Image (cartoon, rainbow, N blue to C red):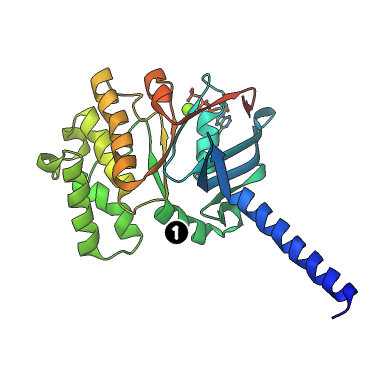
Amino acid sequence: MSIQAVCCKLLLLLQNCILHALHCCYYFTIFEGHIFITLLKANRIYKAFNSLQVLKGIDVNVARGEIVSIVGASGAGKSTLLHILGSLDNPDRGSVELEDQSLFELNPKDLAIFRNQKIGFVFQFHNLLPEFTAFENVCLPGFIGNRNETEVKDQATELLTYLGMQARFDHKPSELSGGEQQRAAVARALINNPAVILADEPSGNLDSQNARELHQLFFDLRSKFNQTFIVVTHNEELASMTDRKLEIKDGIIQ
Ligand SMILES: Nc1ncnc2c1ncn2[C@@H]1O[C@H](COP(=O)(O)OP(=O)(O)OP(=O)(O)O)[C@@H](O)[C@H]1O
Ligand SMILES: [Mg+2]
């Protein structure tokens, strides 16, 4: 083999190594000296409502098993960002990838399926359907995802029992306390084993004791299932418990 051919081969090898290293940087997050696999990656997110520019180029990287909080003043754009991360709203510019899948490249039908399988939501007001029992509410995302009925019911039983709701299966949301409603909402968010749970002010409607229990539950679920959470909160206690606090101010993460 000529010297030129050897040089060409070496150059190609070097190029492949650089590309591989770049790929690794892209999908790994280094935090406090540890390397984590990036689960969710948002790049340069911009969002305006008419003339109000709310998000001005937000980057977010979240590793699997992380619990990250998003904080900031009222109107800073926390819910707007969370909705975009959860594909409930489109950014004007920017991309969101979850488990290497670029959300906004999916057509609406595939995006709805992907969201059902991969993202769980918990809101300030539980958003349980009033005409269904706690058990039925928890099962619904599994049925919507066309999963096996027995498997979904078994999992709902297991989750509700784990969350201390065994005596409340057949209660409708109006017959549950605020804390119980939120625990049912967490079980509903977990039913399809999502990659990430996005929570918007999950304890905003709870008294301090129930809020504390709900926060602890997130950490228990991380320990048990390596569950990833991104939580928008005004609750200082919760924010300081999380692995990382991202503060939105003036449309960017400070
Ligand atoms: N659909 C919409 N149309 C017009 N303006 C909107 C819309 N949604 C949000 N906004 C505006 O965008 C800004 C950011 O709203 P967002 O709900 O993201 O704030 P937030 O940080 O979640 O606030 P809070 O802590 O009060 O929930 C606010 O000024 C809000 O009025
Ligand atoms: Mg909000």
Instruction: Farthest residue to the left: give it.
Output: 167
Ligand 1 location (quadrant): top right
12 in relation to 144, above or below: below
Mark 1 Cβ inside 8 Å of ligand 1: no
As drawn, is 144 to the left or to the right of 98?
A: left
> Which residue is rendered at x = 56% and y = 40% of the image?
30
Choose between 230 and 143: the one closer to the eye.
230
Can I make out residue 27 in this image? yes
Amino acid type indicated by mark 1: Ile
Residue 46 in the image, given as x and y percentages of width and height: 66, 37
Can I make out residue 90 in this image? no
Choose between 66 and 20: the one closer to the eye.
20
Other residues around mark 1 within 10 Å, as few (<14) / some (14–19) / many (≥20):
few
Quarter of the view holding residue 182: top left
Q: Secondary structure at mark 1?
A: helix
Residue at numbered disc 1: 113
> Which residue is rendered at x = 33% and y = 64% of the image?
146
> Which residue is rendered at x = 55% and y = 22% of the image?
75
Choose between 130 and 84: the one closer to the eye.
84
As drawn, is 42 to the left or to the right of 118?
A: right
Quarter that holds the N terminus: bottom right
Residue 23 in the image, given as x and y percentages of width and height: 64, 55
21 in relation to 199, above or below: below
Quarter that holds the C terminus: top right
As drawn, is 178 to the left or to the right of 93?
A: left
